[in-house]
Image (tube, helix red, strand yellow):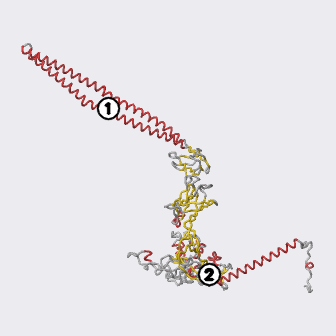
Amino acid sequence: MVTSSQTPPVTELFDEPNLPSAPPVQTGVGKRLFHIVVALGLITGVVALGAYGSTRWIGGASREQGPVVLTHPVARGELVVTVIEDGNVESASNIDIKCEVAGGSSILWIVDDGSLVKKGEKLVELDQSVIEDQINQQKITFEKARSSMIQAEKDYEVAQITVKEFLEGTFKQQQQDQQAQITIAEENLRTAQNSLQHTQRMFRKGYVSQLELEGQQFSVQRAQLELDSARTAKNVLEQFTKVKTMEDLQSKVETAQAKMESEKAALALEEARLKKLQAQMDSCVIVAPQDGMVVYANEQSMGRFGSQQGVQIEEGATVRERQTILRLPDLSQMQVKVNVHETKVEKLARDMRARIVIQGKDFQGSVASIANQPEPTSFFSATVKEYATIVRIDGEAQGLRPGMTAEVEILVAHLKDVLTLPVAAIVEQRGAFFCWVKKGAGREVERRPLVLGMSNDQFVEIQDGVGEGDQVLLNPRASVREARTDNGKGPETDVQKKFGEQSNAAPAADGGPKGGPPGTGNGPPGRAGMGSPAPTGGEPRQPGQGPPAGPGGRSGRGPGGGMGDLMAADKDGDGKVSKDEAPEFLQNFFDRVDTNTDGFLDKAEIEAMRNRRGPGGSGGGPRDLMQYDANGDGKVTKEEAPEQMRGFFDRMDPNGDGAIDREEIESMRARFGGGGPGGPGGGGGFGRPPE
């Protein structure tokens, strides 16, 4: 135990042999550098402390004074309304190089895509082995047809000669023979008659007997019969045999002629086939019809599951007949094809001027055509309808090639000296549009209905409602409660005018099933159950307005409404809410709610989620979060918060102090709107998310 009042030096208490001595303090430049570093460190610390203190002071002041109010003066100016879309550059005039081979062929060789070629230069070489076999077979068929045609020609000539032979030879000979028979018969008759006369004289004198006289009379009769027969034979020859033989011979002539014509046609057909095959043989080697740049015709078609690549143009690929293989675009006439969404296409018209930006270069053009039918869609974008619009580039654009990406801005309207307001300053409620005008130097504002005109992405034309010089709030939803909730103001919905007159067979509007127990929130009359129309006095939800929470209504946390209002987030109208469409708070536990894991929330899943949360939200409003304040300090830390809420805890803590106090809870409740704080039908729903 040390009793001395003085403590010995450290070197005396501990033995430290061979310890290195401290380096001597540098002087001169080193000393000045040391001082500069120390001074910079002090200045940095002071600035950091000042910034932190200012941030805390400004944050506290803003919480005490409410949200910052931003205004914008109403002024006259010009408003340029445009439609901006991306597209691809293509040629307005293309020469298509197609496969002319019947039945198609395969590519043996092809020029490189994008090559610059001259007129007459070889582009494609197709397989011609099959055509060579067809040509050899066709030559045999052609020679057979030619042989048949020659034989038919000779038969026709023989038939013609036969007719001439009969008329000028055979018939005349037969006619002369018949005439000779007649002459002989006439001479025999005359001789028999003279003999009969002599016999009759001799009979009267008694020199001949009766029998000799009768024999001579019979000779005369026989000679007469022979003469009549010869004359009849001549008449038959001239009137019947000649006509019959001529008809027979003429039919043979006509038959031979028809066969000859048929063989000629067959020969012509086979010759045409042979020439076609020979032409196809020539078509197997395709040359450039003009100078240009080669572009492969690789087309993409829209299938069920997106764009699908067709036949790939390359060496070895099989191409069908009349299929386009290459294109030679005219680079002096270029255009851009853009797909315009159906919500914008109605604004467009032909000859509208356009500005085209391609790889940093500006061009000018005009709308050449707008498609009447939308482009084919895929399975993943079946609800997206886009219309192909062609924008022609003025003049001869240098340095452009097909396939380049272009940004097209089409001028729809150019309004001058009109009143305009920023889009953020306008709120839509119940189908009408409003803004809030600041009155005087205080914080008092006035709600003004607006009549809107045309608009672009930033400003809207104001036709009536405000005057030049009025100070309009830029952030009305953040600073004016009236902008977040409708408070029942606005025109009433004429249901009969909107939906038509109700027939006698239709059920009464208030005769359907009711929703849950009546709500006790402060919101307007809400929906009957999940997604059903309000049984009495229901009105549609407006942008920025809290969810309906009247009789039978259920409200929770949603995009301006409760879980029953989640279907309002269905932007594409397919009856489902995707993760991208879902509110930000729901995206943190979207997969747990999507029980069938199809990437969408349908009405059944939303109803099941709402039933799990219990009537009126999730068991309390934002104020009920204070039940998790375990240490009673008036704040809920991330550790005290329920596990389901920790995923989005930081977004509920705007000042970043690691805890949520009552003021932040009230601010959160004001941002999300809704009915009363908690209870059935209230604007609660900030408790634990669905499990």
Is residue 579 in sight in this rendering? no
For this orientation, the residue located farthest to the left is 205
Query: How far from the left and from the top, in percent, is residue 336?
Result: 57, 58
Residue 437 placement: quadrant: bottom right
The residue at which mark 2 appears reads as 667
User: Above or below — where is 536 with respect to 241?
Assistant: below
Residue 494 placement: quadrant: bottom left
Query: How far from the left and from the top, in percent, is residue 358?
Result: 62, 59
Identify the secondary structure beneath mark 2: helix
Q: Residue 249 bears which disc, if any? A: 1
Instruction: Name the residue nearer the viewer: 161 or 461.
Output: 461
Quarter the C terminus occupies = bottom right
Query: How far from the left and from the top, in percent, is residue 14?
Result: 91, 77
Amino acid type of the residue tagged 2 in the rendering? Ser
Left or right: where 341 falls relative to 204: right
Quarter the N terminus occupies = bottom right
Residue located at (43% from left, 77% from top): 496
Amino acid type of the residue tagged 1 in the rendering? Leu
Identify the secondary structure beneath mark 1: helix
